[in-house]
Image (cartoon, rainbow, N blue to C red):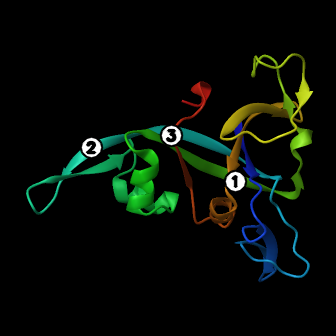
Amino acid sequence: MKLLLYCTKANKYDRLVRDEHYGKPFYLCGAITENFESLNGKIVAECDFEVEEISRIKSWNSTEDYDWEYETPTLYYYDLLRESCLTCDEFEEYIEFSGYAIHIKNLNIFDEPRELYDCLIHPKIEHRYYGCEHLSKAPQNMMYVELDDIKYVLISIKPEWLCKILNGEKTIEVRRKVLKEMK
């Protein structure tokens, strides 16, 4: 199973666009150029992934008191912050007690972004649907879909974070919850 990365729709000042930089694609968020191609509301990439649980641990500080830090089985706190492009405050506010680190691997950016309608919701995957239906609106977080007869997890990501993923700056997406087959 792989991930499909969906760029959420946002206001007109928060668009993800593809531009050319030294002859290769470069992604900008918030940029509005004369001939921009907005990627908001589209599936822009697929990738392999691994999921690790994030644990909250006590860390002693210099005042002989303790702070909370977070780690996964393979990453210490500051590595987790660096690879997720989050500040300490952003991370702690979002995660609170526990969460998951989704490692993004083998990123494949589509030459032509895909539409949500290209995806099918399979009844064995999402039991609340009867028969195979085309996807008409994006999930709030993530859901199972099929695209070209391949099973995926479609994950919604805000334009500013997706921009960092597509440019190779962000390799971990942090979520409070993931689908059970992803664990």
Vertical comparison of 5 with 123: above or below: below
Residue depicted at x 75% and y 64%: 11
Q: Are marks 1 and 2 in contact (CB under 8 Å)?
A: no
Q: Position of residue 18 (x, y in %)?
A: 81, 70
- Residue visible at 65% across and 64% down in the picture: 160
Residue 107's tag is: 1
Q: Residues within 10 Å of mark 2 (few under 14, many from 20)?
A: some
Image quadrant assignment for residue 136 = top right
- Say above or below: 149 vs 27: above
Q: CA distance from mark 1 to mark 2?
A: 31 Å
- Location of mark 2 (residue): 57
Amino acid type of disc 1? Answer: Leu
Whether tag 1 and tag 3 are in contact, CB under 8 A, the answer is no
Residue under the image location 75 percent in, 22 percent down? 126
Looking at the rendered image, the disc whose residue lies closer to the viewer, 1 or 3, is: 3
- Label 3 sits on a secondary structure element that is loop
Residue 183 in percent (x, y) is at: 54, 30
- In the picture, measured across the screen, residue 100 lies left or right of residue 168, that is left
Q: Nearer the viewer, mark 1 or mark 2?
A: 2
Residue behind mark 3 = 176
